[in-house]
Image (cartoon, grey):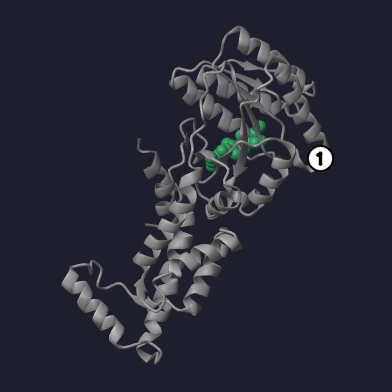
């Protein structure tokens, strides 16, 4: 699939930010270096000679800089500015420093080292949405307004259909009429029935009807869209709790997945959303949307590092096929601009 070349292309803002940041960190000091007395003279020669002898010197023209505390600090600041979070940035920087202190390194080695660190953090959380034999597998989708819940459900439904699964969608965001219409459009595109209720009606009773329908049709999956007004947490909590209560009347093991949809463009705010929703619901995995055209992709690293919740999928656009599994090494390389 050509998906990740699409990701690389669309992650340009993030990658140009981090990639250019790394280039700058190395190049600034390297340019000033001939006059810098602190630069150990024999080092570059020895390295250059060793490199030549070992045939490793692939980019001889690349500027290099001695990795010292000042450079590490710049690296740290840059990663924090790229939404990686302070703790994660500190640890990533420390790991990069290990075995490299005092050595002269170029931007490519730095990018590679950073990509390796990011991959190591992300690999354990890259897990596709698990599919169970249980019918219907109930997937509850939560998140703040505008994070991309409805769009993600549309994309997911379409991909599950394409994989031969039968799907039912419950439009339990009865708060906004537009949300219901939007879901109906997605449903008809994907060829998936969408259960709706009048605006303002009880989302839990719609969820119950949807369970009945999904069971009667022995659908493989039931995707439940929900409202996301975080400004009224008590209400939202009660609404979610009620939805869970009624679907458990039909199947006490439901919901089998609770997906939290996060908008990558919100940066560090995504972290507090995880906190808030984990208090309200048993979040089992994340979907990260809007990774196209944001300079804040670094927040995924902070999320993976802080919570370890599986990242089931990422969204890189508004079209039906702009959702795919999360591939950590491709993501890391795209993020650092390799
Ligand atoms: N660029 C981009 N836009 C997205 C993505 N996912 C959703 N959107 C857009 O974000 C807006 C809000 O999405 P919606 O699904 O309605 O969010 P909801 O309120 O959580 O249901 C819509 O305009 C979507 O088209 C994505 O991955 N990339
Ligand atoms: Mg919605």
Which quadrant would residue 198 be assigned to in this image?
A: top right
Quadrant in the picture for the C terminus = bottom left
Instruction: Residue under label 1, please give it.
Output: 232
Q: Which residue is rendered at x = 64% and y = 10% of the image?
A: 213
Q: Position of residue 141 (x, y in %)?
A: 64, 31
Asked whether residue 121 appears in the rendered view, the answer is yes
Quadrant in the picture for the N terminus = top left
Which quadrant would residue 231 be assigned to in this image?
A: top right
Query: Which quadrant of the frame does ligand 1 lie within?
Result: top right
Which element type, helix, strand or loop, lies under badge 1?
Answer: helix
Asked whether residue 198 appears in the rendered view, the answer is no
* 53 lies left or right of 233: left
In the image as oriented, which residue stretches furthest toward the top?
A: 216
Q: Position of residue 102 (x, y in %)?
A: 39, 79
* 183 lies left or right of 189: right
Q: Which residue is rendered at x = 61% and y = 42% of the image?
A: 262
Q: Which residue is rendered at x = 43% and y = 43% of the image?
A: 327
Neighbours of disc 1 within 10 Å: few (<14), some (14-19), many (20+): few
């Amino acid at each position: 699939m050509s998906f990740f070349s699409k990701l690389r292309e669309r992650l340009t803002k993030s990658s140009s930010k981090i990639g250019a940041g790394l280039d700058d960190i190395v190049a600034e000091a390297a340019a000033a270096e001939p006059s810098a007395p602190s630069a150990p003279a024999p080092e570059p020669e020895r390295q250059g000679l060793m490199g030549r002898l070992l045939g490793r010197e692939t980019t001889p023209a690349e500027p290099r800089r001695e990795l010292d505390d000042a450079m590490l600090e710049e690296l740290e600041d840059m990663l924090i500015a790229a939404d990686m979070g302070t703790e994660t940035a500190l640890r990533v920087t420390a790991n990069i420093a290990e075995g490299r202190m005092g050595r002269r390194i170029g931007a490519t080695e730095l990018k590679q080292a950073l990509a390796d660190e990011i991959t190591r953090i992300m690999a354990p959380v890259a897990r596709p949405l698990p599919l169970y034999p249980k019918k219907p597998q109930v997937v509850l989708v939560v998140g703040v307004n505008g994070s991309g819940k409805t769009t993600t459900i549309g994309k997911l439904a379409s991909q599950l259909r394409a994989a031969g699964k039968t799907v039912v969608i419950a439009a339990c965001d009865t708060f906004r009429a537009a949300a219901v219409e939007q879901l109906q459009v997605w449903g008809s595109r994907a060829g998936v029935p969408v259960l709706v209720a009048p605006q303002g009606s009880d989302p839990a009773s719609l969820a119950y009807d949807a369970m009945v329908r999904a069971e009667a049709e022995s659908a493989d999956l039931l995707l439940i869209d929900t409202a996301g007004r975080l400004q009224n947490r008590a209400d939202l909590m009660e609404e979610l709790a009620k939805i869970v209560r009624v679907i458990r009347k039909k199947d006490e093991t439901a919901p089998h997945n609770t997906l939290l949809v996060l908008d990558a463009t919100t940066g560090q705010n995504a972290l507090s959303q995880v906190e808030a929703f984990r208090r309200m619901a048993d979040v089992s995995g994340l979907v990260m949307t809007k990774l196209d055209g944001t300079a804040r992709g670094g927040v995924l690293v902070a999320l993976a590092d802080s919570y370890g919740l599986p990242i089931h999928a990422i969204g890189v656009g508004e079209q039906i096929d702009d959702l795919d599994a999360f591939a950590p090494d491709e993501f890391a390389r795209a993020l650092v601009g390799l």
